[in-house]
Amino acid sequence: MYHVLPIRNFSIYLGAIVVLSSIVAWSALSQGVLTLCFLKENSMAGPIPRLSPGDPNSYSRPDLVKVTKIDLDLDVDFDRHILFGTASLDIQRINSTADSLVLDAKDLTIKQVKDEVGSILAHTLDVPLGSFGSKLTIALKITSATVVIEYETSPNATGLQWLNPQQTSGKTHPFLFSQCEAIHCRSVLPCQDTPAVKAPYTATVRVPKEIVVLMSAQRKNVSETEGVYKFEQSVPIPAYLIAIVAGKLDSRVIGDRSRVWAEPDVVEKAAYEFAETDDFLKAAESLAGPYVWGNYDILVLPPSFPFGGMENPCLTFATPTLLAGDRSLTFVIAHEIAHSWTGNLVTNANFEHFWLNEGFTVFLERKINGRLYGEQSRQFAAIGGWNDLEEVVNTLGADNEFTKLNPDLTGSDPDDAFSSIPYEKGSVFLWYLSDIVGNEDFEEWLKTYIKHFQYQSIQTEDFKTHLLNYFKDHRMADKLDQVEWDTWLHGKGLPPYKPSYDYTLAEACTALKNRWVDWIKDGMPQPAPFSPLDIRKFSSMQVVEFLVQIFAENIPEEAIKQMEKAYALNDNHNSEIRLRWMRLCIQGRWKEQVSPALDYATSQGRMKFVRPIFRDLYGWEEMRQKAIDAYYAHKDQWMYMTAYAVAKDLHLEEKKD
Ligand SMILES: *[C@@H]1O[C@H](CO)[C@@H](O)[C@H](O)[C@H]1NC(C)=O
Ligand SMILES: *[C@@H]1O[C@H](CO)[C@@H](O)[C@H](O)[C@H]1NC(C)=O
Ligand SMILES: *[C@@H]1O[C@H](CO)[C@@H](O)[C@H](O)[C@H]1NC(C)=O
Ligand SMILES: [Zn+2]
């Protein structure tokens, strides 16, 4: 049942409807003991406050008691769409007066909690607040060093996606994958779901025969016939980097420390596409220091994966929309590799500092690009990034809180704040700093920064202090005097500085765009002077740049049809080109293109591609209902994040019954 209403701020609305009376539930334990399990009263009617001193989006209190190691023992139940088993958490008392462990839990059924000697520990699960889930408080005994939580996930877990065989490429086996960033790990296991806490983990996972399990960790001795898989991640990581996938998977070796994993009918194509992985790794190491994670594997997921890639340690999760057949979209892999340092080693302490993960990673990704393909290629990629930045500031509005590098996320789901801002504004900031201190010194500083903060979680202030001290020590403090810190970190809209990019690789795109604009101004005389030769020498990303530039000119439908005649863009299945082409067609109100645009947007779940199409169609009144119908027809095939985001783009809100 759908309940549709226009919304302003989804999460605040959800906060306001959580008004429950106090419930006391008795749960019978296997030993025949009864424990009391409270659902505490919560009649929050206003906006949601900061949930804890260290993290607006996590209830956990690592300042009192901190989780130092996680050990999972789980069964994957494909029939019920749940994970069930235990999460054992080693703990350390930070404040000696603390007598309880506070965790995040979302849609979890907590069956019982014990300590390492089997004594039952009382627990309280508060009523959930919006997308943040519940506060889970476990009363500790003085001697407790480990809490063992028996639990199961909900089929609705926002961090898990369960696919039936029909939704996979092979169509024979079911499939499960997770996406925990930003705050969905709490729907997979009870945990301190704040990136301020880092812990190593181990896992034992049982699955039906023929299903392969992988996690963001080293694979241990596998006994495949038994369907039991074991993992160990010995590097401390934040909860959002815990990841699991289970399905019919095969692999190919693509480098000394790399394999690519995918469904069997996709794996060869993936191995070809990602053959440059080892070159990326070596370039990244030369920029950032040694790779500490052992192996670097890539997993290609079914099309509903919501992101381009996710930097799960040891095992990057990647969308199949990268499989262009010509290695033209592998910059996403360079990005995920860069996260092995910026994000996974040096981690944002909460998602208000997300730019420390993403801005740095985009900056490094493009440095890798420059090392491998030359400085002009790096500059060209950065021009594309600036385009995205202008677009997102336009879409959000220059007065939007989420256009700040360092936004206030009190009461806001980080999924709502998610945009290109931390990525592109963040990387422009680093580009600017590099411009003023000089490229070589900046690269040296970057290495020092990573080494200094590795294995830690930090805030923007830590970065700033380190940078200022470093350049003071190197007698270059004066160069940083000109930085308008407040404008960069807390200002809204576009940044105060646009780098003077080298436009060499964009020039051919601009020249072709100008030819089209002139021809349109002349009244589109026939025969049109365009042919496939115009773009024959273009790289895929140059075609993208051309389409972005022509989009800014708002050209008429007739000209777009002529462009299709000349360049056959409908036949081009490169996902980045297709996005810009479909948007151009929608902008020109070319009706016949709406169905193919919706097919493109619903045949996969990558938000970067899905959302703009739905937003554009929402803005075309005649097609709005068609877009809404397509949303309802496909939302169950998308992962939670995509469905949630598109509902917002279409100004729909679905009320859970
Ligand atoms: C320990 O926690 C108590 C209660 O929350 C608090 O009053 C006290 O200041 C904390 N002590 C330290 C050293 O942080
Ligand atoms: C691996 O598993 C096999 C059988 O399951 C066992 O005999 C062997 O000792 C294990 N090896 C290691 C290194 O754990
Ligand atoms: C999952 O969500 C559906 C509808 O949104 C609801 O009917 C169902 O009770 C939920 N299930 C659980 C286990 O939370
Ligand atoms: Zn990233």
Image (cartoon, grey):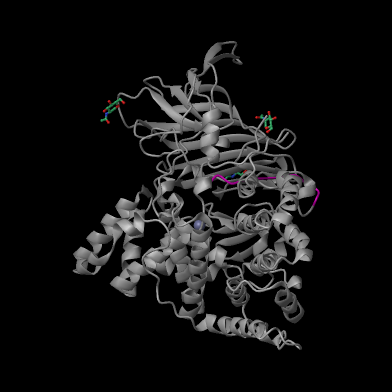
Depth check, front residue: 248 or 465: 465
Image: 532 above or below 254: below
60 relative to 173 in the view: left or right: left
User: Based on the displayed image, in which of its 4 quarters is residue 153 positioned?
Assistant: top right
Depth check, front residue: 399 or 187: 399
* 173 part of magenta stretch: yes
* Quarter occupied by the N terminus: top right
Locate residue 465, reporting x and y percent.
26, 55
Quadrant of the image where one finds ligand 1: top left
460 relative to 302 in the view: left or right: left
Give the prevailing secondary structure in the magenta stretch.
Answer: loop
* 151 part of magenta stretch: no
Locate residue 358, reporting x and y percent.
46, 57
Q: Residue at x 49, y 65 (%)?
A: 390
Q: Which residue is drawn at 68% across and 51% down?
A: 304
437 relative to 541 in the view: left or right: left
Locate residue 224, reporting x and y percent.
69, 45
Magenta span of residues: 171-181
The answer to whether residue 474 is seen in the rendering is no
Depth check, front residue: 279 or 64: 64
Depth check, front residue: 517 or 121: 517
Image: 12 above or below 260: above
